[in-house]
Amino acid sequence: MARVLVILKVLPEDVEIKPEELEERIKKALPEGYEVKGYDIEPIAFGLNALR
């Protein structure tokens, strides 16, 4: 079976959500066999940060 690397940009619903908390929620939602290899925090505007 092939392995694929996917890069996504994920925006939180609210500025109150910390990027680390969002990353944990994503990890918990992934199906078995999938994993988060890493992420960067990208400032967007007015305290809003995206994960990439």
Image (tube, grey):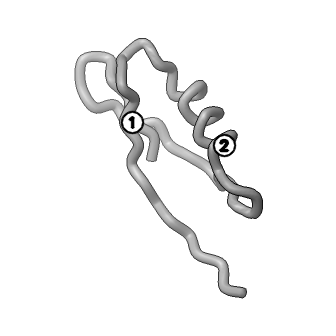
Q: Is residue 17 above or below residue 10?
A: above
Report the front residue among 42 and 18: 18
Q: Are marks 2 and 1 in contact (CB under 8 Å)?
A: no
Crowd around label 1: few <14 · some 14–19 · many ≥20 (10 Å): many
Query: What residue sits 47% from the left and 19% below the top?
Result: 17
Compared to 45, does 28 lie above or below?
Answer: below
Given the image, on which type of amino acid does mark 2 rest? Lys
Q: Where is residue 23 in the image (x, y as percent from the top left)?
A: 58, 36
- Circle 2 sits in a helix, a strand or a loop, which is it? helix
Circle 2 or circle 1, nearest the eye: 2
The residue that appears at 66% across and 78% down in the rendered structure is: 3
Position of residue 12 measured from the top left corner of the image (x, y, whole percent) = 40, 29
The amino acid beneath tag 1 is: Ala
User: Which residue is disc 2 drawn over?
Assistant: 27
Asked whether, in this view, residue 45 is left or right of residue 34, the answer is left
Image spot of residue 32 (x, y percent):
75, 58
Looking at the image, residue 33 sits to the left or right of residue 40; the answer is right
Residue position for label 1 = 50
